[in-house]
Every structure is written in structure tokens, then in C-alpha cells.
Amino acid sequence: MQAKVPMSELGARLERFRARMDTADPGWELALVSSNVNLYYFTGTMQDGILLIPRNGEAVFWVRRSFLRAVDESSFPQIRPMQSYRAAAEATGPIPGTGYLETEHVSLAMYQRLRKYFPFRDVQSLDGVIADIRSVKSRYEQELMEKAGSIHRHVLEDLAPSLLRKGISEAEFSAELYAVMVREGHHGIVRFGMAGAEIMLGLIGFGESSLYPTYLDSPGGNAGMSPAVPLLGSRERKLECGDLIFCDIGCGYHGYHTDKTMTYVFGGTLPDEAVRIHQQCLAIQDQIVPLLRPGAIPSQIYETVTAGLEPAFLENFMGYRDRKVQFLGHGIGLEIAENPVIARGFDQPLKEGMVIALEPKKGIMGIGMVGTENTFIVTPHGGRSITGNHPGLIRVG
């Protein structure tokens, strides 16, 4: 079993949370955390329960199932069993008029159950505060992400090319790649910072399949197994000579992710224009990397980079046709798509220890999605890649 998240790490997270809450609302009294990922962030275990964080007093993790596993996995000092929210509410004492909840995660049904025992007059959101403190990674978190990045680089640059062969389907390649990823240390799931978005790998497409629309907020796409399962890849789309292979996948290690895209060319070459466009995407990544320093403003980075691009290049840049994303990079950690985002409207300065995946990409009719993606840690010297620096378009076959 993985070593427990150190108590010093958990304590520091709670301390940062309380300090940030004091800034957001000096009169706050009680916060309730219930989503799996945030429970893991604060307690080091992912069980069915609620974490009550009072402004004054000790935070308590009340667990419905499994209390025994929570105690076994976590070094959090106060873990208590409960059959219902009643026990937690009664032990908390007087319930304040305002409660702070994860409004992006709490369903109406759960809110109504909570209100039975926590009769807040008003509810405020915790989501921005938690996103803010999670955006800066401690050295402990960075080390886990560096391990994920090492696995990611090795699999996509060294091992994946040997899996590509004429006639293999997207679904078969995805399944074989998944097995290799898990064997090399991938934790087996990719979590996104959006509701209902947990998948095994990411977006894998042969040729124009990589331009097919997807519900994920991503430049690339694929058709998936079927309308009922728009994941992995098509059983019918088989690899042919001259195909571009687009592989945009996440890799996780003990909860923490990296994001990387690698492209391959099977049994031939791409047109010179497609190669030129791919190289321009690489140049955009290289332009942004030195800007990933503490104090830099994400929205200014976005505006500076996009303002320098020709209108013809902007067509189908960061997507295809009317399906284009409005960012150049996104934060990453316990989930893919965290703060900060390299996009308009993100005006808070970068901080040392933030981790950002840059993914300049462009769709090309008849070819597919070209471009790159790597994960970078923000440092005083600019972004430091933890997923490698391979330019892509690896020739196979």
C-alpha cells in the first residue's frame, strides 16, 4: 500500500485553507467538504463522509463507509464513524447561520439531507478557495507529479510506437496502451475537474478521427466505442499507412496527474504544410515556457501569444471548425483542468509551484490534430517540463 500522506502535509493544507478563508470572509465559522477528491486532499483517504472544518477548533472527518479503511489509510488526527449526518451535527454544537459547501459538487438531494441536520440560513461556495490553495503544489505533490511525468514520457516516447501496426483499431491500441501504462505505474484512472468526467486514458484518434467532437473541453477528439461510450476509440477505425496518430492522454501516480500529447506518423510522411503547422505549435509552446514565472498574468500570456498569430493560422487553432477551446494551457494536479488557466479572464498572478499543461494544437482537414502538450512546473526561471520535450511526429512502420 502507498505510504500515507504525511500529517505535516495535511496540516499545512488545512492551515492554508483557514488562512484563505479568513481573507475571503473574516466572519466564516464552518465549512463542509464532501467531494472525493477534496476529501483526499485534506484527509489522505477517499471515503464516504464529510469533513467539518470549523474556524476555531479541530477539523473532524466523519465517515460513513469505510471507517476502518479511513483509519488504516489516513494520518488525519480526527476520524470518527457516523451512521447519519445527525451524529456529526450533534457533535459540532451550535450550527452557524452561514455554511460553506462545495456548491459545484453538492447535489440538491444531498443539500436537502444536510439541511435536515445543518439548518444553515445561507450557503456560500467553497469551490474558489479550495481551487486556489490546490493550485500551488507542495514539494511532496511535485515529486508525485514528477513520477507521473516520468512514466508518461517513457510510455509515449519509448514504448507506444511498438504497439502501432497496420490494421490495429483505435480501441485495440487504446487497450494495449492502457495495459502498458498500468504496468509502468499509472494509477489506472484520469480525473477531470468537471462533473462526470473520469476516464482511463484520454483522446486517441487515427487521422481525422482526432477531429471528431467530444464533450471534454479539449482541442482534440475521437468518436469512441459508441454513442453510449464515447471513450477509448473506435473498433472500426483501423490504422492505415500514412495515418497521423494523435494520442492525448493523462497519466497518474498516487492521485496526481500529468497531461501529455504525442503524435506519430505510420508508414509514410505527412504533407509539408501539416509538418509546418505542427512545428508552429511547438514554437508556441516554446514561446510560453519562459513566461511561466511567478508574477506572470495568465490572461496577458494568452493575449500576447494569440495576438502574434496570423488569422489563417487561428482558423482551426485549438480545435476544429466551431469546436475550439478558449485556452492555451490549464492547471493540473489531483485532477486535469485545475487552476490556473492560460486564458482570458484569469488575472491572478502565477505562483511558484503551480503546474500547468500547455497544449497548442491545430486541426487540419484530411489529416487530423497536430501539435503538442507537456506539463510544466512554474519556477523563477520559467516552466520546467516534467513530461519530456520530444517534438512529436514520431515515424513508425
Image (cartoon, rainbow, N blue to C red):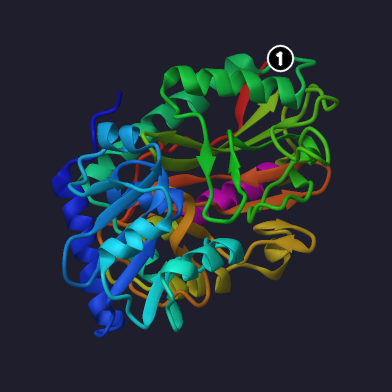
Residue at 16 percent of width and 66 percent of height: 57
For this rendering, which residue is in front, 376 or 396?
376
In the rendered view, would you say 12 is above or below 23? Answer: above
In the figure, residue 30 lies in which quadrant?
bottom left
Q: Amino acid at mark 1?
A: Arg
Badge 1 is on which residue?
Answer: 165
For this rendering, which residue is in front, 395 or 46?
46
- Is 95 on the left-hand or right-hand side of 315? left
In the rendered view, would you say 155 is above or below 120? Answer: above
In the rendered view, would you say 80 is above or below 296? Answer: above
Q: How many marks?
A: 1
Q: Position of residue 167 (x, y in %)?
A: 80, 16
- Residue stretch in magenta: 274-286
Quadrant where the N terminus is found in the figure: top left
- Is 336 on the left-hand or right-hand side of 16? right
Q: Position of residue 171 (x, y in %)?
A: 73, 25
Q: Secondary structure beneath disc 1? A: loop
Q: Position of residue 146 (x, y in %)?
A: 32, 37
Residue at 23 percent of width and 34 percent of height: 4
Assign the magenta stretch its main secondary structure.
helix
Q: Is residue 277 magenta?
A: yes
Residue at 41 percent of width and 23 percent of height: 185
